[in-house]
Amino acid sequence: MCGIVGIIGKKQVTSEILNSLKKLEYRGYDSAGIATLNNGEINEVKCEGRVDVLEKNLLKLDTSGNIGIGHVRWATHGAPSNVNAHPHSSNEVSVVHNGIIENSTLLKKDLIKKGYNFKSQTDTEVIVYLVSEYLKKYKIKDAVMKMLSNLQGSYALGMIFKDYPNLIIGARRGSPLAVGYGPGENYLGSDSYALKSMTNKISYLNDGEFCILNNDQVEFFDEQGSKINKKILTLSSDEKNYDKGDYKHFMAKEIDEQPNVINNCVNEYIDKINNDINIFNFPWNEKDIRNITLIGCGTAYHSCLVAKYWLEELTDFEISVDIASEFRYRKNKFKNETLYIFLSQSGETADTFAALDLCKKNNMKTCAIVNVIESSIAREANFVLPTHCGPEIGVASTKAFLGQMLVLYILTLKLSFLTKNIEQKLYKEKIKDLKNLHNKVKNTLLLENKINSVANVFSDAKGCMFLGRGTSFPIALEGALKLKELSYIHAEGYPAGEMKHGPLALIEDGMPVIVLAPRDNYYKKTISNMQEVIARGAKVLLITNKSEDDVFSENIWETIEVETANNDLLPFLLTIPLQKLAYFSALKKGYDIDKPRNLAKSVTVE
């Protein structure tokens, strides 16, 4: 969600900024722009639309310079347009901004009284004129500090200055920002991926910090302006996972990578010699934990819902699940015996990070399950469990969802064993099943052709429903979310038993309904619920697992059978056809699968 790049060096930087912006396209955006500094002048080019439009516009104007900033914008204040695109500039300064300035209206009124004329509808423009005002009275460091002290809300900022041609300033509060180091040049970026083609040496700003970059030096400061030291991290130089290879879309590649993702994650967490789960560095005694609260947004929230069933079944902990954006605004009753687990693919999800920050301020036990171990959430949590999924570029999460569920399930088994809620024999059997899960997923992916053949019905539908019970209910929610994200079809997930309490009124002749009915404890009840919607004219796609028993129902439109497994692992297998269904439905409609409209990969605003 929005992306920042800044480069200062000894050579022309425009092409490098452009290439980095292309890497940030996966975050989701609606406009783009670049500003460079050359011969004492700020040169700005920006446009509504994609980076390739910006690239064509750059050919028409001189944007040379050895210092510059770039941005891809996901609209918050002001509709997508050339005027609202970043950077925003005055005669003195040019600014790119991720986040939301909550007091921008009040600041704008004051600045208008002082004679500033606003061109855009963005909150970002107040930053430009506010720092311009302070530059009349203060040297640059103090002017920036004064400006930052007036801002309420969240921001990651990159700024260049007409009268200071040898520096870029970055600042962070609530929205991630990284600094990269190179020979004779240094970099600013909203994430490491944007900088990785230029450097593998990275530092991250924490909330309230700002930095000053020269071509040969980087200085970091805290909120009071005192100089601080930052740790330099070395990133992996492996780039192959960022390439689509022979795939048309990153999403298709990432779906097909899931067997390897599961295998990699299992290898990381399971000691094959002792047939045990090797989470040995758990920082708390399990006897000190009575409650577990799982917190996430979107797809991560759905993985939390699945884990709730596992934890309740296999442990004696009191389990609750919360949407991060709701959690921090309620009156929470924090208890020392509660473990708070935060899930985020990017590790930068603003609402999830804010919930984590609230828990830390109340001295709670915090655990992060993330895909990016250098991320803000990973750095702030007491304990981190990586998902080992590798980079996920497609906006609609697929392999990260399976990775999150897998780590949650592995943690559930370990806690169950430590608390003596599961016998050793059964514990070992479940670990053995985990070792073969990647093969089950691999075989389930072979259903692609059948899923493709039924996708026409969904791509033409005006709406549909996904039904399930038990752990299949959160998978139904996830299936509906994927179809909404990619195909822009109204889709809802429900517990199958809730249909008769209202949603059944929506069923009409020919309406597609996906029923998730694996051969678990809920199977017969779900089949009964399925018959209720068939009787109202629904066109039912039944997704179940292979069995020698026949399905106890008639008039089913189509049936897809995934591989069979123990009940705990069925959510992983049921997810696969839903991901493929959403993908093929969007493909048939000709939509931009990796960059669905209005959405962003890394949601860095509340």
Image (cartoon, rainbow, N blue to C red):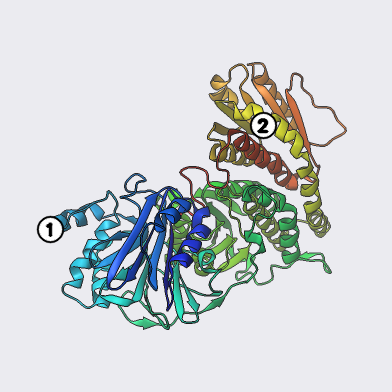
Q: Mark 2 or 1 closer to N-term? A: 1
Q: Residue furthest right?
A: 548
User: Which residue position is annotated with label 2?
Assistant: 455
* Relative depth, front residue between 165 and 211: 165
User: Which residue position is annotated with label 1?
Assistant: 115
Percent position of residue 278, x then y: 73, 68
Percent position of residue 416, x then y: 70, 58
Residue at (25% x, 75% y) in the render: 163
Q: Residues within 10 Å of mark 2 (few under 14, many from 20)?
A: many
What amino acid type should be assigned to the residue bearing mark 1? Answer: Gly
* Relative depth, front residue between 174 and 27: 27
As drawn, the label of residue 228 is none
In this rendering, the answer to whether 105 lies above or below 165 is above
Cα separation between marks 2 and 1: 58 Å
SS at badge 2? helix
Q: Residues within 10 Å of mark 1 (few under 14, many from 20)?
A: few
In the figure, is residue 130 to the left or right of 183? left
Percent position of residue 102, x then y: 29, 54
* Relative depth, front residue between 516 and 584: 584
Can residue 493 be seen in the rendering of this structure? yes
Residue at (23% x, 51% y) in the render: 119
Quarter holding residue 520: top right
In the figure, is residue 186 to the left or right of 401? left
Quarter holding residue 503: top right
Quarter holding residue 508: top right
What amino acid type should be assigned to the residue bearing mark 2? Answer: Ala
SS at badge 1? loop
Q: How many marks?
A: 2
Percent position of residue 447, x then y: 77, 39
In this rendering, the answer to whether 558 lies above or below 293 is above
